[in-house]
Image: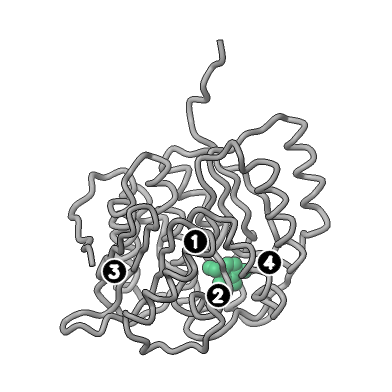
Amino acid sequence: MKVQSPVKQIMAIHDISGYGRTSLSVVIPILSTMGIKVCSLPTALLSSHSQYNGYYFVDLTDHLMSILAHWKKLDSRFNVIYSGFLGSHKQISIVEEIIKTFGAKCDFIVIDPVLGDNGKIYKSISKQIVVEMKSLVKKADIITPNLTELFLLSGKEYNCKADEEKIRAMMLELSESGPEIVVVTSVPDNNPGRNFSVLAYNRNGQRFWKVPIDYIPADFPGTGDCFTSVLTGALMQGDSLPIALDRAVNFISYGVRATFGYKHDQNEGILLEKILDRLNYPMPISSYEIF
Ligand code: PXL
């Protein structure tokens, strides 16, 4: 008799930034709270995330293959492979190798192409990472770029005022190149009374989804990592795509609201510790739309 594992297991390929709430510092608590076991493959070690000045950076590229060789010996299996911030362009071919080795037995592969935000590329992301990320996303089932990353992956100049038609065309093109599901965060919504939305396209069923978000004038690093982690956890728990999107938007919006009321350094991210337990509350409202 083959005994089934009592919890699902995810391989999380992200950096560890000691100070701030990004990458593994949020991926692990969110997925653990959602009942999922996280196996961390750290891509880099940073004193803080890269929005702080003067951060210390240790590239872990040369250690990844040895860690993976040990995991292979342990006969480890992963329900999901989930990658985020990568420490060097060489790590892109390592993630491709991981997908070849462990991907066939996975339920799905999530790639969050962490490259930049607000029209700018993050300080430690080289041009080569941007170029090679374009080929890596083709190997994913689900990708979750923000608007800046969508433009970078599409090879187009960033335009924060791009209309929804153009954004949809870029999503379709990306999906046709590989990933079944393309989720885009931080999309400005030009409709009256609206601020931002998360848009998603599922090639299976050829449907677009939209979840509107109320705007709060604050920018907290790491919210993208929190968003993709909740989305991934919800899908692993068996939610449909629109409900998983709703849960992720709802959690992040609540986190931003809970943090905004305090005198707080925005660079420290949302006050995740105060809201983690909400991941196990029944969903208060559903606000997704079909379009
Ligand atoms: O949240 C994305 C992210 C991940 N990892 C590092 C970062 C950032 C964004 O600033 O700097 C190191």
Mark 1: secondary structure: strand
Q: Please, is residue 187 above or below residue 45 in the view?
A: below
Q: Point out the tag, 1 or 4, that comes first from the N-terminus.
A: 4
x and y percentages locating residue 32 in the rendered image: 47, 42
**Label number found at residue 143:** 1
Q: Nearer the viewer, residue 29 or 3?
A: 3
Mark closer to the observer (1, 4): 1
Q: Point out the tag, 2 or 3, that comes first from the N-terminus.
A: 2
- Name the residue that disc number 3 marks: 257
Ligand 1 within 8 A of label 4's CB?
yes
Q: Amino acid at mark 2?
A: Leu
Q: Amino acid at mark 1?
A: Ile
Mark closer to the observer (2, 3): 2
Mark 4: secondary structure: strand
Left or right of residue 179, residue 125 in this image? right
Q: CA distance from mark 1 to mark 4?
A: 24 Å
Quarter of the image where the N terminus is located: top right
Q: Point out the tag, 1 or 2, that comes first from the N-terminus.
A: 1
Residue at x 58%, y 61% (from the top left corner): 138
- Name the residue that disc number 2 marks: 153
Q: CA distance from mark 4 to mark 3?
A: 28 Å
Q: Amino acid at mark 3?
A: Arg
Q: CA distance from mark 2 to mark 4?
A: 25 Å
